[in-house]
Image (tube, helix red, strand yellow):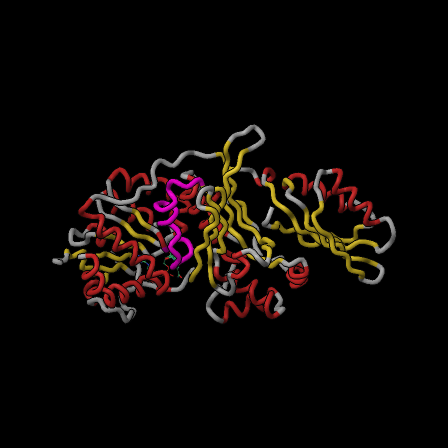
Amino acid sequence: MESSLIRVGMLGCGHVGAALAVLVAERRDEVARRTGLDLSVTRIAVRNTAIDRDVPVNDDAFTTDAASVVADPEVDVVVELMGGIEPARELVATALSSGKPVVTANKELLANHGAELYALAEANGVDLLFEAAVAGAIPIMRPLRESLAGEPIRRGMGIVNGTTNFILTRMTDEGASYADALAEAQSLGYAESDPTADVEGFDAGAKAAIIATLAFGARVVAGDVYHEGISGITVDDIEFAADLKHCIKLLAVAEQTVDEDGRSQVGVRVHPTLVPLDHPLASVNGSFNAVFVEGEASGDLMLYGRGAGGRPSASAVLGDLIDAAGNLHGGHGAVIGDLEPVRIAPIDDVTSAFYLNLEVDDRPGVLAQVAAVFGEHGVSIRSMEQEGLGGEARLVFITHGAQERDLRSTLEDLRSLDAVRAVGSVLRVIGD
Ligand SMILES: NC(=O)c1ccc[n+]([C@@H]2O[C@H](COP(=O)([O-])OP(=O)(O)OC[C@H]3O[C@@H](n4cnc5c(N)ncnc54)[C@H](OP(=O)(O)O)[C@@H]3O)[C@@H](O)[C@H]2O)c1
């Protein structure tokens, strides 16, 4: 087969970009043999051209002028791997407007400006592909927009942040404190020196917005996502959860529900969650990621793998690059379609089962008082464990499905009982 030369302009040559440049060179002959596309990286924009990057690309391909890469008539496809919103947004928009397909791994950009960029790609008849933006090497974007395009998806749940999954796994397996597990993640390079974006759920929140957009064809942005992080999780919580045959994971959840008036709405949230030990997500440990999709006709699906790292993420970028290059001459491939404005479910409307633990006076009648408060707010108890602490007792509950607002008012009343000394962690539970 005669192959067509596809000239690739890269914006960024850091962890993912450098790995991509290597992978393109390593795979060039095989990709050409299998697809007829001869991929060649011809231009690369970086901030500092003096750094030796050890990639198989000529030195004169490098520039600090990113706009010149996008504008270069000798660049057929643009790959954005610089991260952040500006100048990435403007560069991607310019490339699409001038009819050049774009591949990006930039979750922050898509979670904030996705809708305008997807529309621009569509209007110009070119691809905007972003498999690596959610869960690194795991193919989840293409399944959501192509394989599952006809599937009514009820819920998507993901472990999409490897840093927090590593920390929670260390706390579970080694009994490490949150602070020690975080320090270990930092020493291994899994966590940044300022870990806020990971541990407080912002990174997972951006990915949740992208998953919700593709799963429901809805206009969902990062600011719509409710999030709670893992910094308040204790080893005690993990041990109580284990006693109840659960583990704790930071989940990104996107689900389609109806409100009290029957209106369709989308709930998007990130929070630590009790996962039953027999659920497939419970076996996703360390820095691994997974996305679990509940379809109406398909049933449950799960995709699992490396959610970050230069080479795994570059693998997903290369897949997109081959797709975009292949579509370049033959018209573009899968489209996202019109994104509908959607009602975002307020967190108070969301229903889930809850785990909570209370420290109470260890005397007769207290359990009945506590149970009465649950009953008054219509929150029913699925299981309860009691542990004597000498003078006081710890009560650990899992409820049946309850609305957040009912659970919140239950907690307020529990806190006002004389017999309740402390209300510990309150966490959502999947299952109901
Ligand atoms: N790292 C991962 O595991 C991973 C996984 C999935 C997705 N992603 C996403 O992939 C993207 C890249 O991540 P990364 O980890 O590879 O980032 P990185 O290592 O920080 O690399 C960023 C690259 O962009 C260049 N750059 C930044 N601003 C620039 C500008 N204004 N003009 C020209 N060049 C500029 C930098 O140049 P210098 O080298 O000269 O500083 C660097 O080469 C991000 O959107 C990230 O969220 C990363």
The answer to if 85 sits in the magenta stretch is no
Q: Is residue 28 left or right of residue 81?
A: left
Quadrant of the displayed image that contains ligand 1: bottom left
| Quarter placement of the N terminus | bottom left
Residue 146 on the magenta segment: yes
Q: Residue furthest left?
A: 2
Q: Magenta residues, as a range? A: 132-152
> In the rendered image, which quarter is residue 182 located in?
bottom right
Residue 54 occupies quadrant: bottom left
How many marks are shown on the rendered structure?
Answer: 0
Q: Nearer the viewer, residue 301 or 94?
A: 301
- Residue at 37%, 53% (x, y): give it: 106
Task: Left or right? Give the position of 93 relative to 289.
Answer: left
Q: Position of residue 215 (x, y in %)?
A: 42, 43
Q: Is residue 112 left or right of residue 63?
A: right
- Image x and y of residue 315, in percent: 33, 61
On screen, residue 210 above or below 394? above
Viewer-closest of 332 and 186: 332
Residue 418 shows up from this direction: yes
Q: Residue 48: where, in percent of width, then height?
A: 30, 64
